[in-house]
Image (spheres, grey):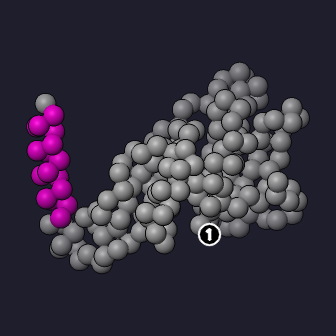
Amino acid sequence: MADTDMTTVTPLGLSPYLTIKDGRGQEAVGFYAAAFDGVEQVRHLAQDGKRVMHARLQINGGLVMLSDDFPDFNDGVAAPDPAGVMIHLEVDDADVWFARALAAGASVRMPLADQFWGDRMGSVYDPFGHKWTLGTHIEDVSEGEMQTRLNAWIASMGQTQKQAA
């Protein structure tokens, strides 16, 4: 386990703070270390010795913090399932990071592919329901070319929807 000295100050900036349901916080720390090469900096357990009160990992130069859900501190109300937020990792090799996330237990949300805006990107669900995208910039695309590609992509999506109906 990482050093738990809280004298290490969290740097200024934006850091996602994830709530992990069902007492799986310690499992989440292990998953993020394996899937995203996370380096655990801090882990504090609750008095029960099982649930995570606070953990912090460095992932690809940024910070992710997490804790278990504590309905007992919230009038017995459990946290809702994760929704409405996606965490993006800009990485040196999306293929390697994507494969590592899948090997650690993530599931594919959107297959890894070259995207119209010039990135190779895909999306996964982690085992705790959080959505992640992993991308690598592969091509500089002008605004005009990007609009042309976007229009083609939108048109192809319309054809896909018509075929599915």
Q: Label 1 is placed on what type of residue? A: Gly
Q: Residue at x 30, y 64 (%)?
A: 114
Principal SS element in the magenta part?
Answer: helix
Q: Residue at x 71, y 32 (%)?
A: 23
**Spot occupied by residue 152 in the image (x, y as percentages of width and height):** 13, 59
**Spot occupied by residue 85 in the image (x, y as percentages of width and height):** 48, 46
Most distant residue in the front direction: 103
**Spot occupied by residue 101 in the image (x, y as percentages of width and height):** 52, 53
Q: Is residue 126 visible?
A: yes
Q: Residue at x 69, y 58 (%)?
A: 57
Residue 154 lies in the magenta-colored region: yes
Image-based side of 160 in relation to 6, left or right: left
Image quadrant holding the C terminus, namely top left
129 over 112 or under it: above or below: above
Image-based side of 106 in relation to 20, left or right: left
Q: Residue at x 10, y 37 (%)?
A: 162
**Spot occupied by residue 25 in the image (x, y as percentages of width and height):** 70, 40
Quarter of the view holding residue 24: top right
Quarter of the view holding residue 95: bottom left
Q: Is residue 85 visible?
A: no
Q: What residue is shown with label 1?
A: 61
User: Magenta segment, which residues?
Assistant: 149-164
117 over 98 or under it: above or below: below
72 over 2 or under it: above or below: above
Quarter of the view holding residue 109: top left
Image quadrant holding the N terminus, namely bottom right
Closer to us: 109 or 45:
109
Closer to us: 104 or 130:
104
Q: Element at badge 1?
A: loop
Count of numbered circles in the view = 1
**Mark 1 neighbour density, 10 Å: few (under 14) some (14–19) many (20 or more):** few
42 over 54 or under it: above or below: below
